[in-house]
């Protein structure tokens, strides 16, 4: 168990969006925190996947291994995102093929070294940082399809008071009847399917009385530049549209109905 | 199955999904391919009452069930169906599998209100065969494609985004054309962002009489389970409540060995995968779950620990 003080920043999937990562790190530095973490999926979707690595390493940001990191690191056949729809898988494979081909051997080696979870203890609170769920890296924990008692079971099995995850791309938090907390920290890689172009990270404060404060922080960045670079790299128009409009155009069939209704497509 | 070559066993890793055979085997349609031969006259399995379902929902809490599915037969023949779904939404996400031919506006209005008041999604899955009257009606009955389509539009008008579950009645390589034509038609009818889920045809029940059924070689063997991702199989993470007790999966309820016990706890025993339908599930995987929860394991999976 690592000993840290009580204010940490958590970045969800970066998806090669190094511009948003730079902006998020600058914002965190202004606010002052004890430590920064990334919950995995460093590459995907965006351009120039190698550009996120020096930012993470140079700023001492500890990373969890996401499904994409496992796939790219080990040159697997697909990204293991868990899509089941043919159109979703078509775009997922374009994204994965590009990311795998454009990640250096050294960075792929780094991805292979990442742990699948990070555990922390802050003021007697046991924190578990993971990618999808405590039990499975690519499990989607959506707000509208995750019952309280299911979460309680996951927390029991993981022996955790606070679980922080990403993977689904949409932030949410929930306090369980037992007083334990689940937080999906959102993602830096693409906007949230709500028509806003900003992305999100999470600030977590564990106070000395044991109470938890979660703040979701919007991050503005140069999305026009990101879209131009995606175009220059031959990434699909659909991906650029998401970056420029804030509406998801792919990976839609994985959404439960409540989350799907929040979007445009 | 020869004694020296037994079918492999599967453990329940985690009771994530609880299904309810809420309309028993009663259906207003008599589809040729129904895997449990449901019909207006088949009462071999009966309705579950609101009281039955409420008791099971409460029982499910200590098992950490993630989501609830309601099937039949046609669930909306059960006179308490609206109340049952409203009750389920107090516990977790609910999905109902319907043919959409008997839906009433006042039920849907109440259900839309209940979903808005809940943290959880209410999903409607509407079953059809192929994407036209020509493919659907010979299997499901004259006029049923148009009636299902009208039901889908009614659901959309009430704010739902039904998942249209279609048995694939065309060669897989024609997916893009067939799906493209169907979604274009749905958009013309008023469903602007249609959600689809494709299913393989299961050779059980009425379908077994219509076609040749499963060959003896179409069974899961122990060798096939080596390095196989068991999370692909519904019996790895689900059970189904019927009026006779708790069974291993919704497809096998008519097989005597599928009945595992009276309680959820008693149903958590291993199951011998000796059926032809087990082979289909093995081949296609995750055919019953919603897309939002049917992801496969990763190489770093800890689900079997």
Image: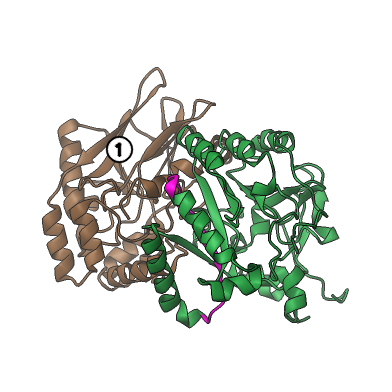
Furthest residue to the top?
A: A209
Q: Which residues are magenta?
A: B157-171
Tell me if I can see residue A241 in this picture. yes
Q: Position of residue A93 (x, y in %)?
A: 36, 71
Colouring used for the render: by chain
Q: Colour of chain B?
A: green
Is residue B169 shown in magenta?
A: yes
| Chain of the residue on which disc 1 is drawn | A
Towards the viewer: B59 or A179: B59
How far across and how far down the image is residue A14, in percent?
28, 53
* Residue B215 left/right relative to B115: right
Residue A158 shows in the view? no
- Say which residue label 1 marks: A202
Structural crowding at the residue carrying mark 1, measured as other residues with C-alpha within 10 Å and reported as few (<14), some (14–19) or many (≥20): many
Residue A167 in the image: state x and y as whole percent: 39, 51
Task: Identify the residue at horizontal 70%, vertical 71% (top origin).
Answer: B32
Whether residue A185 is in magenta: the answer is no
């Amino acid at each position: 168990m690592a000993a840290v003080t009580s204010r940490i920043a958590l970045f969800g999937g970066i998806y090669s969006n190094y511009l948003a990562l730079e902006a998020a790190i600058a914002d965190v530095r202004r606010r002052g925190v004890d430590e920064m973490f990334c919950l995995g999926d460093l590459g995907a979707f965006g351009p120039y996947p190698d550009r996120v690595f020096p930012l993470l390493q140079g700023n001492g940001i500890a990373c969890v291994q996401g499904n994409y990191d496992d796939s790219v690191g080990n040159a697997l056949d697909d990204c293991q995102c868990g899509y089941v729809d043919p159109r979703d898988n078509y775009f997922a494979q374009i994204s994965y093929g590009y990311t795998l081909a454009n990640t250096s051997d050294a960075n792929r080696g780094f991805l292979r070294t990442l742990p699948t979870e990070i555990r922390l203890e802050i003021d007697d609170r046991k924190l578990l940082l993971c990618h999808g769920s405590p039990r499975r890296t690519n499990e989607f924990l959506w707000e509208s399809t995750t019952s309280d008692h299911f979460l309680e079971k996951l927390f029991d099995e993981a022996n955790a008071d606070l679980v922080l995850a990403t993977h689904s791309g949409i932030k949410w938090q929930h306090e369980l009847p037992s007083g334990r907390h689940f937080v999906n920290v959102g993602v830096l890689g693409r906007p949230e399917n709500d028509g806003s172009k900003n992305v999100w990270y999470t600030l977590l404060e564990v106070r000395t009385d044991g109470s938890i404060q979660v703040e979701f922080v919007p991050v503005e960045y140069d999305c026009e530049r990101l879209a131009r670079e995606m175009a220059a790299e031959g990434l699909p128009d659909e991906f650029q549209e998401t970056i420029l409009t804030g509406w998801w155009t792919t990976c839609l069939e994985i959404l439960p109905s409540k989350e799907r209704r929040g979007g445009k497509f | 199955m020869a004694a020296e070559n037994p079918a492999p066993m599967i453990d329940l890793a985690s009771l994530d999904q609880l299904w309810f055979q809420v309309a028993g085997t009663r259906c207003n349609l008599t589809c040729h391919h129904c895997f449990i031969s449901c019909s207006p006259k088949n009462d071999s399995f009966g309705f579950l009452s609101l009281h039955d379902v409420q008791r099971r929902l409460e029982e499910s809490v200590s098992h950490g069930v993630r989501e609830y599915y309601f099937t039949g037969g046609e669930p909306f023949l059960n006179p308490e169906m609206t109340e049952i779904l409203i009750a389920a939404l107090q516990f977790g996400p609910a999905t109902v599998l319907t043919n959409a031919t008997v839906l009433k506006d006042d039920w849907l209005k109440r259900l839309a209100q209940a979903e808005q008041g809940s943290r959880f999604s209410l999903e409607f899955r509407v079953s059809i065969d192929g994407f036209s009257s020509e493919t659907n009606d010979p299997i499901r009955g004259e006029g049923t494609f148009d009636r299902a389509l009208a039901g889908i539009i009614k659901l959309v008008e009430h704010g739902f985004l039904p998942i249209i579950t279609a048995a694939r009645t065309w060669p897989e390589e024609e997916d893009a054309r067939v799906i493209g034509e169907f979604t274009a038609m749905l958009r013309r009818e008023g469903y602007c962002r249609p959600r689809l889920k494709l299913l393989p045809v299961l050779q059980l029940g009425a379908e077994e009489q219509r076609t040749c059924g499963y060959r003896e070689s179409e069974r899961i063997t122990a060798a096939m389970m080596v390095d196989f991702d068991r999370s692909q199989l519904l019996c790895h993470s689900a059970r189904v409540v019927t009026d006779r007790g708790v069974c291993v999966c919704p497809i096998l309820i008519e097989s005597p060995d599928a009945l595992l016990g009276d309680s959820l706890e008693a149903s958590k025993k291993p199951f011998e995968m000796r059926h032809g339908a087990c082979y289909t599930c093995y081949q296609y995987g995750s055919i019953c779950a919603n897309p939002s929860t049917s992801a496969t394991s990763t190489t770093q999976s800890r689900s079997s620990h």
